[in-house]
Image (cartoon, rainbow, N blue to C red):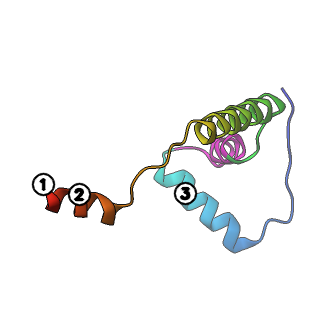
Amino acid sequence: MATLYVENIPDDLYEALRSRAKARRRSIAAEVLALLEENVPTAQELKARHEWVQKLVRMRAKQANSRRDFPSTEEMQREDRER
């Protein structure tokens, strides 16, 4: 596992990170790692996202092909009133 060192962190950012870590009962290093895991996608995560988007595109195309003309809300209300 790699080691990462970060220098010259602005004081306000460091304090915010420290407060966040304390609130979650983590070390600062553990909090930084959690933030990186949440916000920096891996190649595997990017691949999964791409596959998910492709699946949505296929579903949307399939839905567009199966659309029928449905009456508008006004037309349905008029039909109900005529009964």
82 vs 46, left or right, is left
Name the one closer to the observer, 81 or 60: 81
Q: How many marks?
A: 3
Residue 17: give x, y in percent of width and height.
Answer: 63, 59
Quarter where residue 19 is shown: bottom right
Q: Which residues are the magenta region?
A: 26-38
Quarter where residue 9 is shown: bottom right
Badge 2: how crowded within 10 Å, few (<14), some, or many (20+)? few
Name the one closer to the observer, 71 or 41: 71
Q: CA distance from mark 1 to mark 3?
A: 63 Å
Q: Is residue 20 magenta?
A: no
Q: Which mark is residue 83?
A: 1
Report which residue position mark 2 lands on.
Answer: 79
12 vs 41, left or right, is left
Residue 15: give x, y in percent of width and height.
Answer: 63, 67
Q: Which of pointers 3 and 2 lies earlier in the amino acid sequence?
A: 3
Write the residue at 65% across / 37% down: 56
Residue type marked 1: Arg
**Dots 2 and 1: beta carbons under 8 Å?**
yes
Q: CA distance from mark 3 to mark 2?
A: 59 Å
Write the residue at 38% across / 60% down: 72
Q: Nearer the viewer, mark 3 or mark 2?
A: 2
Badge 1: how crowded within 10 Å, few (<14), some, or many (20+)? few
Q: Which mark is residue 20?
A: 3
Q: Nearer the viewer, mark 1 or mark 3?
A: 1
Residue type marked 2: Glu
